[in-house]
Image (tube, grey):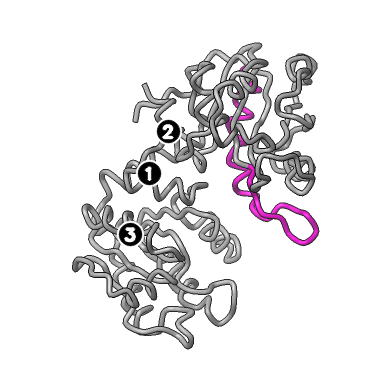
Amino acid sequence: MNLRKVQDADLNEKKVLVRVDFNVSLDESGNVKEEFKIAAAKETMEYALSQGGKVALVSHFGRPGGEAKEEFSLEQLVNDVERILGVKIKFVGDCLDENIGDELETLQDDEVLLLENVRFYAEEESNNAEFSKKLAIPFDVFVSEAFSVCHRDQASVTGVAKILPSYAGLWLQREVENLEKLRNNPEHPAVAIIGGAKIETKLPLIHKFEENFDYILVGGKIANEAIDQKIEFGEKVILPVDFSQDRFDIGSETIENFEKIISGARTIVWNGPMGKFEEKPYNTGTKKILQAIIESESFSVMGGGESVQILEENGAMDKISFVSTGGGAMLDFLSNQPMPGLDVLND
């Protein structure tokens, strides 16, 4: 793809709207658990500020159903966002607030605006044209830094991008570069590891990987579903030969088979756990597969909320070549599904 890059934009004294993805999970105390998704926006934000831009961040958070609900307010993230991004946040309680333009004018060099949850308006998900115009009014430039929603055709993803000069952020550029390499020209032997649930959503991806990968290792609930439904695959697709008790994890013989294939790989992409990893002892398969990937000398990519959780829990975020912020978006990109949020940035 030939994306328009934020490095090519004139941001000096411009009001810049950056679409980020702060749709993170919180712990029992209300603290952010998925710092990685917030940190992914830092480099682009710092770049825009260094170029003299006045920056506002816009995101969704949860599924409020087009209504303003306190439990889905981004205000509760302000302290964590300030700490992770290293800036002062001025929170605006309505993403269409008529004073946003004035607020941008008064920002100090180390301040950015954080707009309230864009999904408090139903028009966001329906990609309402009038809503997109209202969201764009205070701004001169739009920057997309939310690869994880680029498979959505929504107002803050595509609608605003068609109105304002629009560019890909620095992290989004890396997402596309690394995933294009996986999709179009992987170094061989290339191994895809697919787990998690919902076989119907993973089947197109498995079939796509059959075209240019050497092995597709299938685990998790989708392996159970594939076996139970007697789904037939080509010889590249390797299903488990045994399971742990209750079929909540892959078995020891399957782990050995997978480890052997992984050890010889030059390219590895992994999405979805091998079992019910959040409960011991059903995390064994997932941990052993992760360790095998780390010990291999492969170019490795992981993505999706559960995959990031696995990495964070095992202190392995820096041991994988590239970690994608996208789950569904990564799968759609790799299986050649429509990516409207990228198409609007493509020359």
Q: Amino acid at mark 3?
A: Leu
Q: Amino acid at mark 1?
A: Phe
Look at mark 2 in the image and give the residue it sits on: 340
Question: Is the residue under label 2 in contact with that under label 1 (CB below 8 Å)?
Answer: no
What residue is shown at x 52% (from left), y 25% (from top)? 159
Mark positioned earlier in the residue sequence (3 or 2): 3
Q: Secondary structure at mark 3?
A: helix
Mark positioned earlier in the residue sequence (1 or 3): 3
| 4 w.r.t. 261: above or below | above
Is 24 contained in the magenta span? yes
Q: Amino acid at mark 2?
A: Pro
Look at mark 3 in the image and give the residue it sits on: 203
What residue is shown at x 79% (from left), y 45% (from top)? 70
User: Is residue 52 something one can see in this rendering?
Assistant: no
Give me the disc on residue 333: 1
Mark nearest the camera among 1 and 3 is: 3
Q: Position of residue 38 (x, y in %)?
A: 64, 43
Mark nearest the camera among 1 and 2 is: 2
| Mark 2 neighbour class, 10 Å CA radius: few under 14, some 14 to 19, many 20 or more | some
Q: Position of residue 243 (x, y in %)?
A: 41, 83
Query: What residue span does the magenta drawing correspond to?
Result: 22-51
Residue that extends furthest to the left in the rendered view of this protein:
235
- What distance separates the C-alpha of mark 1 from that of mark 2? 11 Å
